[in-house]
Every structure is written in C-alpha cells, then in structure tokens.
Amino acid sequence: MVIDGGVFMNKIVSEIMKVAGALESTLDGLSNAKARKVVSDLVGRVTNGLFHDEAWVPVSNMVKAFDSMGWDWEQVGASRYWASEEWQRILKENGGKNSPNDHKEWKYVVRFVNDKQRPTEISVMVRANATGRIGAGRDVWETYDMDMGVY
C-alpha cells in the first residue's frame, strides 16, 4: 500500500494525538529502558508504511509528535543523502540514469531526567529508503519506506 503524503497528513495528525494520549506525556522520571521504549513506540508509529510525497511527511510528523509530547529534543547535524554499495552498483549498470542516492538520514536527540535524577539523552535515527522503480526516466524516490533506530 502506498500512502499519499497529503492525504496521509490528516490521518497521521490524529494518530499522533492518540499516541500522545496513550503514551507517557513526559519521559522525566522513567528508567532509561522505559523512556527508550516510549520514544521507539512513537517513532515507529509515525514512520511505519510506504510513503509517496516530496516533503518527508513522516519526519515532519515525528517532530510534531515530539512537540505534542512536550519533549526536549533537537536535530543533530543536517540531514544527509547517501548511496549504499548495492545502489552504486545498480547506478553503474544502468549508466547513472537515476538519483545518485538511495537513502536519506536524519538524527535527533531527546533529553530527559531519568529515574535516578540524571540528565539523559536518547538518540533517534530515521532513514528513508528509496523504493521506486529503477530505469531511465524513473524516480527511485517516487515511493519510500522508513526505518529507525532508538538508542
């Protein structure tokens, strides 16, 4: 199933509000493991699926969810595009007629005070993976999925 970013926006905003009500509204006072689980659950819900947009809607929705939860967060460095070794091989085989990259990555940090009263940071990495068609005149970014890491 491909999700259109514009149509999906209203649905995901509703989902964010459900997530905000269903999860801890604050991370402060939680153990490190529990806080990571809360962050991971939220990020996973917002970035799950196939997407079809040019504005990185899942990433925008993720930071809106962080704000709606009242979390202290920031983006770490600029987002970056990169090419996997497999993608570099495919480009070479088809004469470089596609996007030079097949991944885009964002990194964030979420801060809280844990159950031991220590300031703590949770790192969040989300990555878009191009899943569109390969070939001349095709855009591998016409569809993408997301994966994430919370540590």
Image: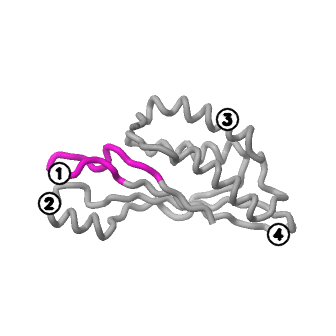
Residue at 39% across, 39% down: 53
Q: Is residue 28 placed above or below 57 in the rendered structure?
A: below
Q: Seen in the image, is 86 located left or right of residue 20?
A: left
**First along the sequence among labels 1 and 3:** 3
Image quadrant occupied by the N terminus: top left
**First along the sequence among labels 2 and 4:** 2
Percent x, y for residue 6? Answer: 44, 31
Residue at 71% across, 61% down: 111
Percent x, y for residue 76? Answer: 56, 63
Which amino acid, by three-letter code, is at mark 4? Arg
Image quadrant occupied by the C terminus: bottom right
Q: Which residue is mark 4?
A: 118
Which amino acid, by three-letter code, is at mark 1? Gly
Structural crowding at the residue carrying mark 4, measured as other residues with C-alpha within 10 Å and reported as few (<14), some (14–19) or many (≥20): few
Verify whether residue 142 appears in magenta.
Answer: yes
Mark 4 and mark 1: Cα distance apart in space: 52 Å
Confirm or deny contact between disc 2 and disc 1 (CB under 8 A).
yes
| Nearer mark to the viewer, of 2 and 4 | 2
Front residue (pair 63, 84): 84
| Nearer mark to the viewer, of 3 and 4 | 3
Front residue (pair 21, 54): 21
Front residue (pair 64, 84): 84
Residue 27: quarter of image: bottom right
* Residue range (magenta): 130-146
Structural crowding at the residue carrying mark 3, measured as other residues with C-alpha within 10 Å and reported as few (<14), some (14–19) or many (≥20): few
Residue at 22% across, 52% down: 134
**First along the sequence among labels 2 and 1:** 2
Which amino acid, by three-letter code, is at mark 2? Asn
Q: Which residue is mark 2?
A: 94
Residue 86: quarter of image: bottom left
Q: Which residue is mark 1?
A: 135
